[in-house]
Amino acid sequence: MNKVLVMLENNYIIDKSLETKINIADFNTLNFKIKSNAKACLFFEAKGNQDSNTKINVELDENASCELYGFFKNTKKKTNLITNVIHKGSKSKCNQDFRFVNKRGKSSFEGKITVPKDVVKCESHMLNKNILLDTHSDAFAKPELDINNDDVICTHGCTIGALDEDHMFYLQSRGYTEDEATEILVEAFAHMRTQEHI
Amino acid sequence: MLELKDIKVKINETNIIKGVNLNVKQGELHALIGPNGSGKSSLANAIVGREQYETTGSVKLNDLELLELDVTERAKEGVFMSFQSPPSIPGITNYKLLSQFSKQYEKYLEDIERLKLQSGWAQRDFNDGASGGEKKKNEILQLLHINPKLVILDELDTGLDVDALKIVKELINEHKNKFGWIVISHNSSVLRSLNPTHVHILKDGKITNTGSVELLNNIDEQGFSDVGK
């Protein structure tokens, strides 16, 4: 019984700095509280072939910062991900970048950033990018901002599309097969996550 | 080496190339010049095998019919095109993209220096944040390591400054005898400086004139519209 509870509810309090990889396929809900001046860098992935439904809740205290990155390849599976970032303290920062590549697969990303009225000088970015490798794949995206004062920097963005045809042609003209070129571009798409801000 | 026979190219039912014949042998450099929209880049893309370019006729490379091959197979048979506007592909390094074809990392670094590309170029993302000139140099860098049979340079000089163009021209001259070349440009002085063995004028999808470097002088004096009248 205990084991089941651990799998369903996970609470992390980060008070210094933490950089870690987390397999979301093991969880339904993940709660992170980033304490004042602490810094977290969290990489999410979904190993295995099973579908997953995960909610990530993040609370940031004053001057806390958090990087949330995720890259998911959905080949014949479905990943549903909800993020809920609440800036509880002023000057807190958060950067989210979640990417999905679907091949006969489905993805759903719902992200929400909340900044209350009396919490100022926060910076929060949310980016969700999806690549559909075939016409049998779907991606759903719902980025949401709930910002209650003007003294913040917040952005959100979302893209859904196929691999760039010009890039595919270029790589093929250099001797890569269609499958090899796809693999290279998917790898490039995954690596870009840490370099791009909206 | 390369033999084009009665090449016709259509894009979305529009005839772009209307019957082109061309023979390129190893060591020959064919300059292809013509006004905007005459079909120069379309001809290059058709030889390389871009899908949207519906091509009829015959394109043989050492007696192998390229029109029966896809773009990857043509590249593996030795067709190389330096793109007019090479893409940027962030997330993969310059060297990684090439490493399937060349394991000569030391030579790669030497060539980077020779081309006066920035140090660290090998590990930078592919053409990411690169200037037009750097992208063109990167095409030449790949050419030196892929070692094809046929080289097509589409608008070679775009983006290259005078010094960069000089380096690229030196490299082309050094490797001239190894490959067969088709060099596309609007710029007759650039083409002249490469000492082409043949010069062709492409107008409205057809080669209207073929000759030696002299033909470039005629273009300079008379313009495209009057040459060959």
Image (cartoon, rainbow, N blue to C red):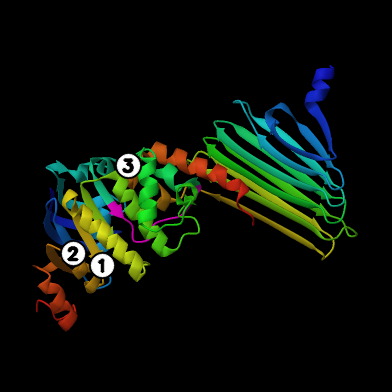
Q: Secondary structure at mark 2?
A: strand
A152 is within the stretch colored magenta: no
- The three-letter amino acid code for the residue at tag 1 is Ser
- Mark 1 neighbour density, 10 Å: few (under 14) some (14–19) many (20 or more): many
Q: Are marks 2 and 1 in contact (CB under 8 Å)?
A: yes
- The three-letter amino acid code for the residue at tag 3 is Gly
Residue B30: mark in rendering: none
Outermost top residue: A1
Q: Secondary structure at mark 3?
A: loop
Give above or below for A26 relative to B102. Answer: above
Decide if residue A173 is on the left or right side of residue A91.
Answer: left
Q: Which residue is mark 1?
A: B185
Q: Quadrant of residue B229?
A: bottom left
x and y percentages locating residue B146 in the rendered image:
30, 44
B88 is within the stretch colored magenta: yes
Q: Chain of mark 3?
A: A
B37, B221: nearer the viewer:
B221
Q: Are marks 3 and 1 in contact (CB under 8 Å)?
A: no
Q: Chain of mark 1?
A: B
The answer to whether residue B10 is seen in the rendering is no
Position of the N terminus of chain A, as image quadrant, is top right
Tell me which segment is drawn in magenta: B81-91
Q: Quadrant of residue B106?
A: top left
- The three-letter amino acid code for the residue at tag 2 is Ala
Q: Are marks 3 and 2 in contact (CB under 8 Å)?
A: no
Q: Which residue is mark 2?
A: B31
Q: Quadrant of residue B35?
A: bottom left
Q: Which residue is mark 3?
A: A175
